[in-house]
Structure formats: C-alpha cells, structure tokens
Image: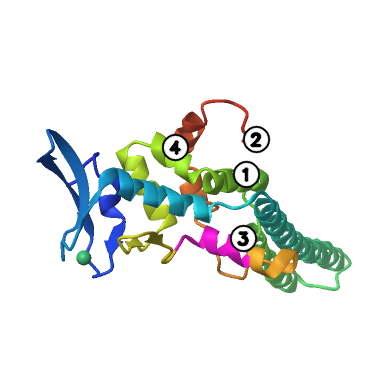
Amino acid sequence: MLNPDFPLRVTALCTCGGKFTGSWSRGHGGRYAYYHCAKCNVKSVKKQVFEEKFMELLQQLAPKAEEGSLFKASVTDYWSQKIQEINTDASTIDKNIQKLEEEKINVIGLAKQGAFDAETTKEELNRIREKITLLKLDRNELKIEKFDIEYSLNFCIYGMTNAHKLWHAFNLNQKIKFQAMIFPEGVLYDYSTFGTTKVSSIYELKEAISAENSNMVPGEGIEPSCLAAGDFKSPTYTSSVTRASGSHELIF
Ligand SMILES: [Zn+2]
C-alpha cells in the first residue's frame, strides 16, 4: 500500500474528491514517476512538479519571523495566565485545608476541656477529615505537569518554518505522519497549485494571532497539535527533527 516513491498519495486530494496515487511510466528512453487521481484520472502530474507544488504550499504556510515572535509571545502570555489562575486556586484550597487542620486542633482542645464527649469528638473529627480529603482531591487535580512551554513553542515554530526542509529529510513514515499532522483532512490539488483546506490548529492559531495582533489569545479548546504532550514526546518525531537539523544551532 505505502510506496516510498509517492509519499503524497496518502495526503493529496483531487478536486473530484478522489485521492491521488502514483505510478511509473515508460517513455523517452526512461521511467518517469507520475501522480494521478485514482478516481477520475483526468490528468497525470510529474512527481517532481507535484512535490514542488506541495513544497510551495508548505513555504506559504511558514510563519514570517515577526509572526513567529508574535505567536510565541501570545501563547506564552496565555500559558502564564493559566498557570497563575491554577496557582491562585491551589493556594485558596491550601488555606482552606489549613483552616480545617486548625479546626481539628480546636475540637481536640474542646474534648480535653470536657466540652465534647467522646462520641461528639469522634463525629466532629470525622466530619473535618472528610472535608480535608475532598479538598486534597481537588488540590491534586490542580498540579501542573512539568511542561517546558518555551521549548515546545520553539519546536512548533521551527517545525512550521522549516516544514519544507524537514519534509525532504523525513523517511516515508515520517512524511506521512507529518502530512497528517499539518493537513488532518488531506490537501487539495487543483492541477495548478495545492490549496489550503483544513490545516492543523497550530497553523490556524498562528493565522488568528497574526490577524488579530498581539492582544489575541488562544481560545478555550484550541489545542495546537504540536503542543499536545502526546505528539510532542513522540520519540520518532523529536529525533527526526533533531537529526534533520544537522547541527546544534537550534534553540531546542
Ligand atoms: Zn479526481
């Protein structure tokens, strides 16, 4: 099914709704690779031309330097704000737990003074312990996972900026994974250029930030795919990007 000669056959879509596939043809004393639509087969496109057009699209989508900085600043602001909110909530819970601990000491004091009998003391202490347990559960949910936002953002921006170079450096599986990440619903080819259909939310976010200037913050629910821990920690992806760079000049 997979063919290293035609990495775009998985991603490229024809205007008829069909998917592109690839084949080799003989002629002019050689073998030539072509992409063509598996459904309408209206026209064959030379592999080289097809893939160059795809590279043009990747280059078009790449953030300009100022867009990259804006994107980074905006996401970092949003991130810091979220962390601040979480920290505030956590400290409120901590204070409430502290109050309940003091309440426990008071109950024990009252019991010692004979104001509470054994049964009441036990009930009161159980009531307080239950409250503490519930608060501690809430508190655990607020623990911030160790996540290096700066590293992740540099990684995203590097990936978006150099998508066309990375694509060449990737092996077939990596190309397919990469294409699926950027174009989750495939990418349309109209026999002239590749068009932007649905792009990854990271690109949408970048566009939105550029359009709305630096006051724009990512909306709730937008989860850039390359910021998601799962994708980001993918060993294949990380190592290939590092290898593709060929040097240690990168920030990450
Ligand atoms: Zn077609």
Mark 1 in CB contact with mark 2 (< 8 angstroms): yes
Q: Is residue 147 left or right of residue 35?
A: right
Q: Which mark is residue 154?
A: 1
Q: Does 215 appear above or below 5?
A: below
Give the prevailing secondary structure in the magenta stretch.
helix
What's the mark number on residue 141? Answer: 3
Q: Disc 2 designates what residue?
A: 251
Q: What stretch is highlighted in magenta?
A: 199-208
Residue beneath label 4, please?
Answer: 235
Identify the mark nearer the N-term, 2 or 4: 4
Comparing labels 2 and 3, the label whose residue is closer to the camera: 2
Q: Which of marks 2 and 4 is in front?
A: 2
Q: Which of marks 1 and 4 is nearer the N terminus?
A: 1
The colouring scheme, among rainbow, by chain, secondary structure or one colour, is: rainbow
Cα separation, mark 1 vs mark 3, equals 28 Å
Q: Nearer the viewer, mark 1 or mark 3?
A: 1
State the separation of the CA atoms marked 1 and 4.
Answer: 17 Å
Circle 4 Cα neighbour tier, 10 Å, few/some/many (<14 / 14–19 / ≥20): few
